[in-house]
Image: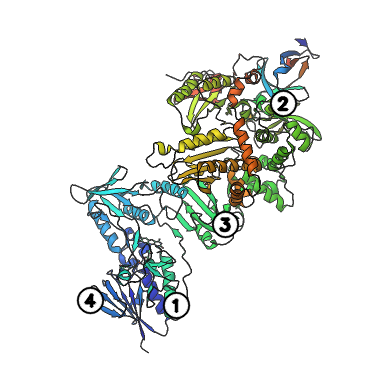
Amino acid sequence: MSPSKHLVVVGGGMVAQRLVEALRDRDTAGTWRITVLAEEPRRPYDRVALTSYFSGRDAEDLALGDPGLWHDPLVTLVRDERVASVDRAARTVTTARGRVEAYDHLVLATGSSAWVPPIEGADLPGVFVYRTVDDVAALRGYVEELSQHRTVRGAVIGGGLLGLEAAGALQALGAQATVLQVGTHLMSTQIDLGGGEALRRLINQLGVGVRLNAATARIRPHRRGGVGRLDLADGGRLDADVVVIAAGVRPRDELARDGGLEIGPRGGVVVDDSCLTSDADISAVGEVACIQGACIGLVAPGYAMAEVTVDRLLGGRAEFPGADTATKLKLAGVDVASFGDAFGTTPGALEIVWADPVAGVYKKLVMSDDARTLLGGVLVGDASAYASLRPMLGRELPGDPAAFLLPEGTGGPPDLELPDDAGVCSCNNVSAGAVRGAVTEHRCTDLGAVKACTKAGTSCGSCLPLVKKLVTTELQKQGIAVSTALCEHFALSRAQLYDAVRVSGVRSFTEVVQRFGTRPDARGCDICKPAIGSILATTAPAHVLDGERAALQDTNDHVMANLQKDGSYSVVPRIPGGEVTPEGLIAIGAVAQDFGLYTKITGGQRIDMFGARIDQLPLIWQRLVDAGFESGHAYGKSLRTVKSCVGSTWCRFGVQDSVALAVLLELRYRGLRSPHKIKLGVSGCARECAEARGKDVGVIATDKGWNVYVGGNGGFTPRHAQLLAEDLDTETLIRTIDRFLLYYVRTADRLQRTAPWIGDVEGGLDGVRAVVMEDSLGIAADLDQQMAQHVLDYEDEWKATLEDPEKLRRFSSFVNAPEVADPSLAYVPERGQARPATADERAAALRGEPVLVAGTTLEVRS
Amino acid sequence: MTILDEPTAVWTAVCRLGDLAPERGAAALVGGEQVAIFRLVDGGVLAVQQHDPFSDAYVLSRGIVGSRAVEGVEVPTVASPMHKQVFDLRTGRCLDPAGKAPARGLPPDLRTWAARVRGDVVEIAVPA
Ligand SMILES: Cc1cc2nc3c(=O)[nH]c(=O)nc-3n(C[C@H](O)[C@H](O)[C@H](O)COP(=O)(O)OP(=O)(O)OC[C@H]3O[C@@H](n4cnc5c(N)ncnc54)[C@H](O)[C@@H]3O)c2cc1C
């Protein structure tokens, strides 16, 4: 039986190949005869693997599928034959060479072409695009030619998937490569800023340069001809002998446009879910098709469209299932994958981030608002979980999603829980298994016992929440009830105690322990006393050293400075928003100089001075207070800093005055005692130079107002803050932050930062938003009033101490010999400053060896 | 100075009770050694070494004073301000090493001094 119908396919790319293959597979009756008209002079090839052309393979190695397909009598492939027009009425196509083919059905599979931005010099010899075998062959020839004379400097315009691949290819050819990315981070379509940052480091490690925010203004020729240099929009320059443009693609929809078919708003031939265009006799598949509103630059969705079309041609009713846009970068030594809702745009989506900057690893999972269903993810540096996670998209992940992000080496997909060999405490190298073992084998029944048994959490303590969780789970498995009691003195949790204290109006520790404690005559401990001190600080504000309050404070809060390893303290004056006058800097410098203090700039945009003896603290404060400074509360579980970028007053890009807002916020919340330290950040534009999304509250300027993000932090488990509200005016912004902070202060667990707290609030971020923005608990007025009171009651703790001789008496070295300085303190010079002497150095000095060890007056200037 | 019952020690006046805040410590130099003196809520005074054997720093007077139930008895305690080890203020015994070992192989328990309040004066027994 001879075929009754003729299918004409325009374009001989990857999707066309799949379509022909599938049709020949399924059309067993031989209804369709197929003609493929292909512009390229070769059979369809594997464009995805194009880069491997550089590692020695030739064009034939890129062949797709069974070559026998093209010998099938029902298939005709015409190469080097570009279709120039379609006559829909006559149902014919005409090629540039004048060949005419009549069709019963037409498929447009014309793909995309590389987009070349309108830059002066983009047409110079030595400027290439990266789409076809011919493109890469020409690039290879050019580089090989030049490299006979010198090292070739290559530049790649575009830091996406393709640009990075191209940079790798340049390197494989022995050229140097620098990637220029217009935006803030690499692969910005697929991965978020955090991932982009990790990726940049990995790319740098390969020896490839990366310039961000680098827009190319023009390409300059070299004297000897060909390209020579790139001029950047910001005035920068980059010498380059060869330039690859990988700035994106444009669908090749010209035939459809000329033929009057419907075109998408950003190009592409509009098709429905059956892949039919606005003409029922014409389908479009692959990159040229605008399906469900967009063209998709990936091959897998194109293959799906080919299958749908074949099914329809054979009378079926298949529909496009929706695009899987998961991608993985194919660059040796750099593992990057992005899948699903990688940017967490689903309403209520939660992000779980694991980052190890040293190892160059950044992993993020986007989960549904109940932290159960996997919505997407970004894996940079270690994409080993990609294979097991991708199939889980849209499904509930068993157990704790964080388990999927922990380092590899567990072999295969992670099991329901944190694998036993996953590291929990990196300071002391304790695995999850060891923590579990402490409960199951060593019969530990509480966190303290587990700490003693395993050493987990005994150094920096940042893994304690994780350890606690593991212990709780393990104890529950053993049928042991786990209490949320604060400590042996209180059966209540911190949040319960806060409410109890607030509602009852008690004002002292003795009253609290008598009314709410387990034993009325107990005197508390290092856990409950500071917790109650912190609670009372917001329910019944008073100076930290007032009466019984003094006994509740950790030494840091007690002496309003930070205890260091040798028993000396460090002093940090407040520098609101990081803004400081030259006079202020000089005053700080003079204090450090006069007291021989080691100085260091902190991450919170201020200055830390180390090595102060307890008896020197009031003298140091006096000098600082006289110079107009006050306590920076660097010691407190309280507001630390509000970091800011320079903002619209100076910055060319700033859209709002971020410094002014940061100063305002820092002065408003200074001294606010909380379950853990709180940090804020304000960025003056979307470039986010203040890294506000790494803060508990991050504010980012928009041209309409401020966006506010909450729950970010650095430290052991870095988190990006999540969007709480958009485009707020300043007044609403402040009210929102007021309520957010106080709701946290009231209800968080002891030493619980905002990120895990948000996770614990009923409804997560949505729950917090409901309370803060919509007053779902009816406590907003109360919170507002409480913050107003805080602002009213604020006083500088240093100044208040200096004014009270009774309080000053706490700061003597020895109660019976206040004139004697602590003889145990000893320092050695290092890089022009003092540092505490080590035990070995002290011993050597005692033995009379020539080690320069001195008391705090060590003279290191010279 | 008064002679103690045992002729090997003398009571040495250190400060006035009013110089000590309730449930906070103070450091004193006694016989060339650093001693941490604590005033409890009931007005009693206890003294242990100022040196913290776990951190190897002279800081114990700056720890938080509290109490712990040990075998049914409410025992006064201090927690090291450095890494939170808990000590019995009466005996110097380390009640909770917080998962650490003392520095340089030192013993975990603290040395204690007898202390008393005479009138308004705090006294420490110093070995002769
Ligand atoms: C270097 C590189 C790496 C890539 N890596 C990946 C990856 O890792 N993962 C992934 O999913 N995707 C990747 N892609 C994208 C992938 O190759 C494309 O999505 C896929 O090739 C699209 O198939 P297509 O048939 O729609 O278009 P194409 O493969 O572009 O084929 C279209 C063909 O039609 C021809 N044509 C156009 N107009 C006419 C005309 N008028 N007449 C005749 N012929 C015409 C073109 O010359 C071309 O040969 C990569 C692309 C490149 C360039």
Check whether the beta carbons of the residues at disc 1 and disc 4 lie within 8 A of each other. Answer: no
**Type of amino acid under label 1:** Asp
**Residues at marks 2 and 3, CA–CA distance in whole angstroms:** 49 Å
> What element does badge 4 sit on?
loop
Percent position of residue A122, x then y:
25, 54
For the residue pair A41 and B71, the one nearer the viewer reads as A41
**Type of amino acid under label 4:** Gly
Percent position of residue A650, x then y:
39, 36
Image quadrant where one finds the N terminus of chain A: bottom left
| Residue plotted at (59% across, 22% down) | A614
Mark 2 is surrounded, within 10 Å at the Cα level, by few (under 14), some (14 to 19) or many (20 or more) other residues, namely many
**Residues at marks 3 and 1, CA–CA distance in whole angstroms:** 35 Å
**Residues at marks 3 and 4, CA–CA distance in whole angstroms:** 56 Å
| The disc label shown at residue B23, or none | 2
Q: Is residue A301 above or below residue B120?
A: below
Left or right position of A520 against A382: right
First in sequence: mark 3 vs mark 1 = 1
**Residues at marks 2 and 1, CA–CA distance in whole angstroms:** 83 Å
**Type of amino acid under label 3:** Ser
Is residue A459 in view?
yes
**Disc 3 versus disc 1: nearer the observer:** 3
Please give the residue where the numbered disc 1 appears in the rendered image. A311
Please give the residue where the numbered disc 3 appears in the rendered image. A368
Is residue A152 in view?
no
